[in-house]
Amino acid sequence: MLTAFTAGLLLITISELGDKTFCIAMLLATRHPRRLVFIGVVTALAAMTILSVLLGQAIAFLPQLYIWYAEIALFIGFGLKLLYDAYQMPAYAACEEMAEAKQTIEQARFGAMQLHPNVAIVGQAFLLTFVAEWGDRTQFATMALAASKNPAGVALGAILGHAICTAIAVLGGRLVAGRISERVLTALGGVLFIIFGIVAAVQGQ
C-alpha cells in the first residue's frame, strides 16, 4: 500500500503543478475566499480520483498481460509527449493554461442561481474543476495505477497530492507560477511518467 500511496502522491503533485485545474484554483482564489475555493476544488479532485480508481479496478478484470502492455504504453507515451512539449516551450514560458482557465471561468454562469453565496462559490469551484479534470492525463494515469497497484493507496496518495497542489494554488499560486518555469515542471512530469513506465515494465517481467 505504501508503494501505491507514494506513486499516487508523486504522480499528482508533480503533474498537477501549473495544470489547468491549478490555474483555475489560483484565479478563483483571487476573487473569492480561499477556504471556499479550496473546499470546492479539492472535493472535485477527490471525487474524480475516486472515480478514476473505480474505473481502474474495473479495468483490472481484463487479462493482466493487456493491462501490463497498456500501462507501459500509457506512461511512456505521456512521458514522451510531455518531454516534447517541454522541448517546444521557451525557457521561461508562462502558464499556457492560464488563458484557457480564464476563459473557462468567464464562461461559467452561476450568478443567476438562487443559492447562498458560499454555496455558489464552492459549487462553481467544484464544477469548473471537475469538468476541467475530466479526460486529463492524470485521470488516465490514476486509472492505470489503480489497475496494477493497491487502489486505496493510490486514492489516498493522489488525493493528498491534489490537496497539496490546490493549497499551493490558492495560497501562493501567482508567486509560485512566477518563480517556477512551466518548462521545467513539464519536463519533470515527463521524466516521472517514463520512470513509472519503466518500473511497470520491470515489475511485470
Image (tube, grey):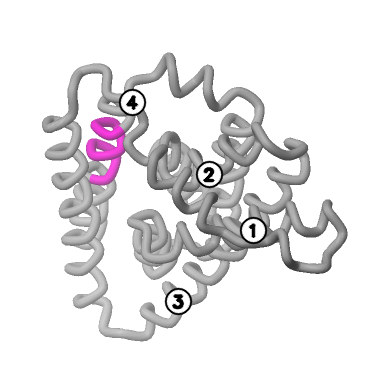
Q: Nearer the viewer, residue 178 or 63?
A: 178
Q: Which residue is pictured at 49% across the width and 64% down the height?
A: 131
Q: Amino acid at mark 2?
A: Ile
Indicate the amino acid at tag 1: Phe
Q: Residue beneath label 4, please? A: 94
In space, the residues marked 4 and 1 are separated at their CA atoms by: 25 Å
Tell me the magenta residue range.
186-193
Q: Earlier in the sequence, mark 2 or mark 1?
A: 2
Q: Which amino acid, by three-letter code, is at mark 4?
A: Ala
How far apart marks 3 and 4 lie (CA) works out to: 34 Å
Q: Establish if 99 lies above or below 125.
A: above
In the rendered image, the quadrant that contains the C terminus is bottom left
Above or below residue 185? Residue 76 is: below
Residue 114 position by quadrant: bottom right
Asked whether 59 falls inside the magenta stretch, the response is no
Residue that mark 3 sits on: 55
